[in-house]
């Protein structure tokens, strides 16, 4: 879609008059500016994310949003500069710049593996396949090009006449008179969207039946009856508003529900795991862990630290055998980092330190603590297992479980497995099948004796004040300890694949449902084209009275943006109401399948704002073709039929 040139007084089909040179079809300076804006927006966004996320330690979603906004503003500014230099909307220049971007993506994917390996973001995309990498890079380029194009069009509307003209009042007045959207019409449309399509059609049929009956009665009495007809353009306008509203409605509800699942999963992961983990480059090399723990607790942002011992074992009970991960924990400090003490269903976590208090099998109460303890050597150490693990082994509190480790003593034939009996001290339920079926906990001292690590531990689990700032806090912890041999990993790294899959799923769902809004924008294009054809005479009159190309474009762009804004407002209200209804009333789910009883929903204002911005941006872009078509109309063509 070529941009309209700067206007001049030349006759139709002829050259512009002297003193009003026509701008070139392709401007090299404008091309350089939009090319810089396209590549610059894509380069500025990750740098801004590093600044907001790492340097300022802002929450992840906020850092991403601010980084995207920074990149978009940089691209829009350079796009506006390109429009000002070229004195036209830099459409051809931007198309050429995007083709160069696509060529660069092809070269990067085909011939530059070293560059891909040097970027963590590119590696994450490539891990999901070459197609995902290509589509991701093209998507980034498309978003950057959109920001540049919006900046170019806004700049042309403001300075397209050769001077700054930011006024909009007259154009808005004309746009309102064209749309004819009365409050009663909007209220009826909102009621139709809220009640649903079928009830709305039924009400429409009843209303039409009543009007037909009234017309027939007037005909029988010989009276004149004028039945009001809805203009076709108004009908198309209402359809466009309804389409945008339904698209925004569906998008906000789906994203809120998916965010609810993500938040529920995050709470369960952070409840059972720490916000971060401090390790060394060797295995079980943390020997002076008590002093290290005190130093870690003095780091700003750290609110809890507990030592752990970590190993994979086999658990057996009778004829039942399963693999598991055993953690040696400090019972006194584990509650400051994880929610393990609160997730105990049966038994007590404290019985790990006092295994003599574990009740016999079949009894839920511990023996009298005043009773004399059993003889030395007769008390088995305790172990805490998950609910699903207990079901797999068919054990209860007090039952015996054998722990088998492949790392045993060295025998004539090599390393021999080591086995030791434990008694079930408690059963926990985290709400996640993976944890309940794989994890078991023993006292730290018992784990050190069983695995033969002496006084060493595997790592520290840390809890920070703000989970979203865990990465920055982990960096401060390593710096405080002097760097090597210490290293740290935050919860996003420990669960990267899971949350990456959730984020990818959310993005895919947003794109798929975004096509509803995209289809609605096509109806905006059709509506505005009909308005242009209907208002040819008015456009001719305006241009003959001196209205410039940007002024005519403003009128029809204001109409399209108004349609998109009203539809977006309706969709946001409906989405917010639907999310509140789901949250308060609830949609029941099977806890045995989903591990939650109701459909979760999280109303995130940033997501609602992002959906609204995307809908308005699409509505704005949809107005460009009809607006340029109206701006190119020759006044003689508009007035010829008169």
Image (cartoon, grey):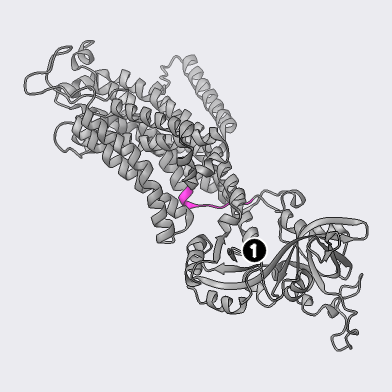
Q: Measuring from the top left, give residue 287's x and y in whole percent.
A: 64, 75
Instruction: For the C terminus, give its image quadrant.
Output: top left
Give x and y (percent) for residue 599: 65, 49
Residue 389 on the magenta span: no
Does the magenta run of residues contain 603? yes
* Residue drawn at x 53%, y 21% as measured from the top left: 213
Tag 1 residue: 271
303 left or right of 370? left
The picture quadrant where one finds residue 447 is bottom right
Pick the residue in front: 544 or 468. 468
Please give the range of residues in magenta: 600-607
Q: Residue furthest front?
A: 412
Q: Is residue 595 visible?
A: yes
Q: Answer few, some or many: residues within 10 Å of disc 1's Cα (few below 14, many 20 plus, some between 14 and 19).
A: some
| Quadrant in the rendering for residue 561 | top left
| Residue at image location 88% in from the left, 86% down from the top | 373
Which part of the image, by quadrant, shows the N terminus? top left
């Amino acid at each position: 879609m070529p941009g309209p040139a700067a206007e001049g007084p030349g006759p139709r089909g002829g050259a512009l008059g002297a003193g009003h040179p026509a701008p070139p079809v392709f401007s090299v300076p404008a091309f350089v500016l939009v090319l810089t804006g396209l590549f610059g927006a894509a380069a500025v966004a990750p740098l801004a994310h590093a600044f907001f996320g790492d340097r300022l330690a802002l929450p992840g979603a906020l850092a991403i949003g601010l980084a995207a906004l920074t990149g978009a503003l940089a691209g829009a500014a350079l796009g506006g500069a390109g429009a000002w230099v070229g004195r036209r909307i830099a459409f051809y220049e931007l198309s050429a710049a995007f083709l160069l971007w696509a060529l660069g993506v092809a070269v990067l994917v085909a011939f530059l593996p070293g560059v891909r390996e040097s970027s963590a973001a590119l590696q994450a995309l490539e891990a999901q396949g070459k197609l995902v990498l290509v589509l991701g890079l093209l998507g980034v380029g498309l978003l950057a090009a959109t920001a540049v194009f919006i900046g170019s069009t806004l700049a042309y509307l403001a300075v397209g006449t050769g001077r700054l003209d930011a006024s909009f009042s007259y154009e808005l007045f004309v746009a309102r008179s064209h749309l004819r959207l009365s409050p009663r019409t909007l209220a009826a449309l909102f009621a139709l969207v809220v009640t649903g399509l079928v009830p709305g059609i039924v009400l429409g049929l009843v209303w039409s039946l009543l009007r037909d009956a009234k017309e027939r009665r007037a005909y029988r009495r010989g009276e004149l009856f004028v039945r009001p007809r809805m203009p076709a353009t108004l009908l198309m306008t209402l359809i466009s508003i309804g389409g945008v509203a339904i698209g925004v409605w569906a998008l906000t509800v789906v994203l809120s529900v998916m965010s609810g699942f993500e938040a529920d999963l995050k709470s369960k992961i952070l409840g059972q795991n720490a916000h971060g983990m401090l390790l060394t480059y060797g295995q079980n090399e943390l020997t002076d862990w008590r002093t290290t723990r005190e130093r870690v607790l003095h780091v700003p942002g750290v609110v809890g630290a507990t030592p752990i011992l970590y190993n994979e074992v086999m658990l057996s009970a009778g004829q039942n055998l399963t693999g598991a991960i055993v953690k040696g924990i400090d019972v006194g400090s584990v509650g400051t980092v994880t929610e393990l003490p609160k997730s105990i269903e049966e038994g007590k976590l404290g019985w790990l330190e006092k295994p003599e208090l574990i009740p016999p099998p079949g009894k839920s109460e511990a023996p009298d603590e005043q009773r004399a303890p059993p003889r030395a050597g007769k008390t088995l150490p305790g172990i805490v297992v998950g609910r699903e693990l207990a079901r797999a082994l068919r054990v209860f509190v007090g039952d015996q479980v054998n722990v088998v480790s492949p790392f045993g003593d060295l025998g004539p034939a090599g390393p021999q497995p080591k086995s030791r009996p434990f008694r079930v001290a408690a059963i926990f339920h985290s709400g996640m099948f993976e944890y309940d079926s794989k994890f078991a906990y023993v006292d730290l001292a018992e784990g050190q004796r069983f695995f033969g690590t002496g006084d060493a531990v595997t790592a520290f689990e840390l809890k920070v004040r703000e989970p979203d700032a865990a990465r920055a806090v982990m960096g401060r912890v390593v710096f405080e300890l002097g760097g090597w041999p210490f290293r740290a990993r935050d919860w996003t790294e420990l669960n990267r694949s899971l949350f990456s899959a959730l984020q990818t799923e959310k993005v895919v769902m947003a794109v798929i449902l975004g096509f509803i809004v995209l289809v609605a924008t096509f109806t905006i294009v059709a509506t505005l084209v009909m308005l242009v054809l209907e208002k040819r005479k008015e456009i001719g009159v305006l241009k003959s009275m001196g209205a410039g190309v940007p002024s005519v474009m403003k009128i029809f762009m204001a109409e399209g943006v108004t349609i998109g804004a009203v539809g977006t407002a309706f969709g946001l209200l409906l989405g917010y109401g639907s999310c509140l209804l789901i949250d308060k009333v609830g949609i029941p789910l099977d806890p045995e399948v989903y591990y939650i009883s109701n459909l979760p929903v999280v109303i995130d204002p940033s997501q609602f704002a992002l959906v609204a911005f995307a809908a308005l941006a699409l509505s704005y872009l949809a107005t460009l073709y009809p607006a340029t078509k109206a701006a190119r109309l020759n006044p003689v063509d508009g007035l010829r039929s008169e």
